């Protein structure tokens, strides 16, 4: 069986663990979000690609859900000493551990030598052996930006006196999404070409799965690449709701949905994807009402427990997604 998954970070990585456990012999391709990518200290950081790679490869910090296991922060402390003791003003709000730095150094050195991000990702995965083929959505530059509503930025208002536009990571990590977003855009996506292998993996797949990733900044960013959205629309797509009982289970996905005017409910997220794209939708039992009144019509909804509390619970969710896909394919 060939399965292609559009993936963000933590939600996707957990789901993928369950999927691999459920169908160990399946050929799984993961198309990773690069909208979260950011250049920090001159290094190209790909948070979502790394979360999937470390989680499936056994190098993740289980406590955090991102970053390396048992990492130390010596480099960060040294950077902090330069910030305090010199005129240097590098960012102080993004945590990177020492082991994690090595990943970003390998990636950045390959990019500096003229290699594409997909080649750097493949090289990193040679070490981690995640058991899936992990491909960035594009080798072209993309960055998700957030237009802040109002003047809540610590550095003051934007140049014209109104809200600033910041990198998604600055809004998410530095501001904890505490300043409401008036808009979210994936810069570069409209012109981006899918990375080598992306369209092939979508076309060859028996099913496309959307894990319970952030619908706006994870899956939404991948679908912002026009050729990817077009290829996915032609396939059987089954998604897992990241919203349970009107709230994201972890994190602040509701703040991203609010920014694009979508209510934080399982039904509204399905309607946002729409029946052209999404064929099947798994919702939690708490959201069973969405089964009786699927909105919009044209999406087949099933309800089951969607908390990824254990590997076994997550494997059951993956099985339900595959069964629904099988049913829809007839
Ligand atoms: P990120 O890039 O690290 O934010 O990760 P993703 O975009 O892949 O996934 C984040 C989303 O996962 C959050 O917005 C949550 O709504 C969702 N999520 C986290 N844990 C669970 C869970 O146990 N069950 C479900 N259904 N969704 C979850
Ligand atoms: Ca992410």
Image (tube, grey):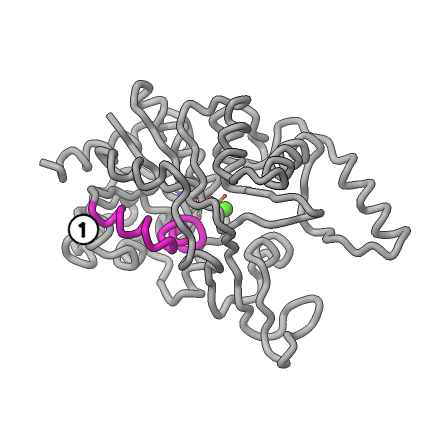
- How far from the left and from the top, in percent, is residue 236? 20, 42
Looking at the rendering, the stretch of residues picked out in magenta corresponds to: 215-234
- How far from the left and from the top, in percent, is residue 75? 77, 37
Secondary structure type for disc 1: loop
- How far from the left and from the top, in percent, is residue 133? 40, 29
Residue at image position (25%, 38%) is: 203
Instruction: Determine whether 277 is above or below 130 in the image.
Output: below
220 drawn magenta: yes
Extreme residue toward the left, this view: 330
- Residue denoted by label 1: 299
Q: Nearer the viewer, residue 242 or 71?
A: 71
Q: Is residue 250 visible?
A: no
Residue 157 figure quarter:
bottom right
39 drawn magenta: no
- How far from the left and from the top, in percent, is residue 318? 30, 32
Instruction: Determine whether 257 is above or below 198 in the image.
Output: below
Left or right: residue 263 versus residue 2 is: right
Specify the quadrant that holds the N terminus: top left
Residue at image position (59%, 30%) is: 61
> What is the chief secondary structure element of the magenta stretch?
helix
């Amino acid at each position: 069986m060939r399965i292609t998954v559009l993936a963000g970070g933590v939600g996707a990585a957990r789901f993928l663990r369950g999927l691999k456990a459920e169908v160990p012999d399946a050929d799984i391709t993961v198309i990773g979000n690069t909208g979260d990518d950011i250049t920090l200290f001159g290094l190209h950081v790909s948070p979502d690609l790394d979360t999937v790679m470390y989680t499936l490869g056994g190098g993740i910090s289980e406590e955090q859900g991102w970053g390396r296991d048992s990492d130390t922060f010596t480099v960060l402390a040294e950077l902090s000493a330069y910030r305090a003791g010199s005129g240097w003003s590098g960012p102080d709000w993004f945590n990177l551990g020492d082991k994690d730095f090595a990943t970003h150094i390998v990636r950045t050195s390959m990019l500096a030598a003229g290699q594409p991000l997909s080649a750097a990702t493949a090289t990193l995965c040679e070490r981690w052996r995640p058991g899936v083929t992990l491909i960035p959505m594009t080798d072209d530059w993309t960055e998700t930006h957030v237009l802040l509503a109002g003047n809540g930025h610590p550095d003051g208002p934007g140049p014209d006196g109104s809200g600033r536009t910041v990198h998604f990571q600055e809004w998410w990590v530095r501001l904890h999404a505490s300043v409401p977003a008036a808009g979210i855009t994936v810069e570069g996506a409209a012109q981006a070409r899918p990375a080598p292998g992306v369209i092939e993996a979508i076309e060859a797949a028996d099913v496309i799965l959307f894990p319970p990733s952030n619908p706006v900044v994870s899956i939404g960013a991948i679908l912002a690449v026009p050729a990817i959205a077009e290829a996915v629309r032609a396939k059987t797509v089954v998604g897992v709701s990241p919203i349970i009982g009107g709230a994201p289970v972890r994190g602040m996905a509701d703040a991203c949905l609010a920014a694009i005017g979508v209510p934080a409910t399982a039904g509204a997220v399905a309607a946002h994807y729409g029946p052209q794209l999404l064929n099947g939708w798994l919702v939690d039992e708490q959201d069973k009402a969405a089964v009786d009144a699927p909105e919009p019509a044209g999406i087949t909804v099933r309800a089951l427990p969607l908390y990824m509390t254990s590997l076994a619970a997550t494997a059951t969710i993956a099985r339900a997604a595959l069964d629904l896909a099988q049913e829809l394919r007839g």
